[in-house]
Amino acid sequence: MVFEAVKYPTCGGVEIQRHGQISTGKKRYICRNPNCTRKTFISDYTYQGYSPEVKQQIAEMAINGSGIRDTSRVLGISPNTVIKELKKRRKK
């Protein structure tokens, strides 16, 4: 039996629990901290554009004046992903 230590990416807490799996077989987790803004996450994403760290980098690069193509090239994701994430951030 192997113990896999997993920390929640948003709050950094360790009060997490397995919450099933997605269609590709990757493990899903749920955070038990009541102060978290997000509740579920996947430990390893197939496409890096879905990870919270990359989404944060998209916002930071936009604030610093990087263009959409530049951001997508540096992070190795699609320009459509960058546009979609910036539109979501604008609504908040």
Image (cartoon, grey):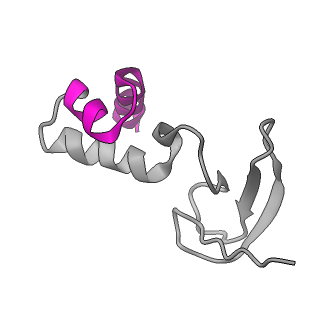
Residue 56, image x and y in percent? 36, 50
Taking the magenta stretch, the answer to whether it contains residue 8 is no
The magenta segment is 69-92
Residue 21 percent location from the top left of the image: 82, 48
Magenta residue check for 81:
yes
Q: Residue drawn at (34%, 23%), measured in percent from left and top?
A: 79
What secondary structure is the stretch in magenta mostly built from? Answer: helix
Q: Residue at x 42, y 32 (%)?
A: 88
Question: Which quadrant: the C terminus?
Answer: top left
Q: Residue furthest front?
A: 1
Q: How many marks?
A: 0
Which of these two is toward me, 92 or 51?
51
Q: Where is 26 relative to 86, above or below?
A: below
In the image, is 3 to the left or to the right of 38? right
Q: Is residue 84 above or below residue 56?
A: above
Residue that appears at 53% across and 63% down? 9
Q: Residue at x 60, y 54 (%)?
A: 38
* Residue 50 spot, x, y in % from top left: 52, 40
Most distant residue in the top direction: 80
Name the quadrant containing residue 66. Answer: top left
> Which residue is at the front of the view, 63 or 90?
63
Q: Quadrant of residue 22?
A: top right
Residue 89, image x and y in percent? 37, 37
| Quadrant location, the N terminus | bottom right
Query: Is residue 28 or residue 34 the one in the foreground?
Result: 28
Residue 18 versus residue 86: which sits nearer the camera?
18
Residue 7 relative to residue 74: left or right: right
